[in-house]
Amino acid sequence: MKLPNIIKTHCPHCNAHTEHDVRLDKRSKEGAMKKGRRKYEAIKRGYGGSPRTPKKDVYKVGKRPVLILTCKVCNKKHQRAYHARTKKRTEIE
Ligand SMILES: [Zn+2]
C-alpha cells in the first residue's frame, strides 16, 4: 500500500489541523519493567503454571506497520493507529 508523504491531520499538541510528515516504523520492543510485565512475572512465580494458555505458532503474512507523524508546526511526534493488515509492503510516496 502506498501512503502520501505529507498528511493534514489533527495535532493533539497544537489542537488544530496541521501538516504532518509521515514515517513508517515497526512496533517497539515491550519494556521489561512495565507494570503489566512485572505483574505477569509475579503471578508466574512459585507453584502453579502460566495463567494464560501458551500461544500457538501461527504464520502471519500481513504486517501491521506503525505510522509516526511529525507535526510541522510544533515538531512533536505522535503515532497513528494503522489497523489495516497489509500483505504487500507499505511504502511512502
Ligand atoms: Zn503540532
Image: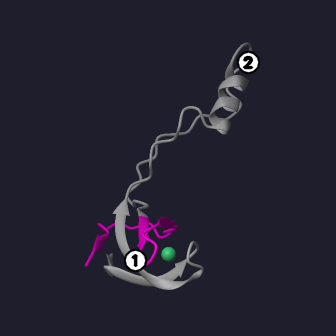
Closer to the eye: label 2 or 1: 1
Q: Position of residue 56 (x, y in %)?
A: 52, 39
Residue picked out by circle 2: 48
Give the side of residue 17 with respect to residue 63, left or right: right
Taking 76 as reference, is 73 above or below it? below
Crowd tier of the residue under label 1, counting other residues whose Cα lies within 10 Å: few below 14, some 14–19, many 20 or above: some
Q: CA distance from mark 2 to mark 1?
A: 53 Å
Q: Position of residue 93 (x, y in %)?
A: 25, 79
Please tell me in which quadrant of the rendered image residue 7 appears: bottom left
Residue with the most extreme left position: 93
Kind of residue at badge 2: Gly
Q: Is mark 2 within 8 Å of ligand 1?
A: no
Q: How is the image coloured?
A: one colour
Taking 12 as reference, is 42 above or below it? above
Q: Is residue 80 magenta?
A: yes
Q: Which residues are magenta?
A: 67-93
Give the side of residue 33 with respect to residue 58, left or right: right
Please tell me in which quadrant of the rendered image residue 5 appears: bottom left
Q: Position of residue 52 (x, y in %)?
A: 68, 35
- What is the number of callouts on the image? 2
**Element under disc 1:** loop
Which residue corresponds to the image point at 72% horizontal and 13% vertical from the top-left? 46
Q: Which badge, 2 or 1, comes first in the chain's sequence?
A: 2
Residue 81: mark:
none
Crowd tier of the residue under label 2, counting other residues whose Cα lies within 10 Å: few below 14, some 14–19, many 20 or above: few
Q: Is mark 1 within 8 Å of ligand 1?
A: yes
Residue 72: mark:
1
Q: Position of residue 49 (x, y in %)?
A: 69, 21
Residue with the most extreme top position: 47
**Element under disc 2:** loop
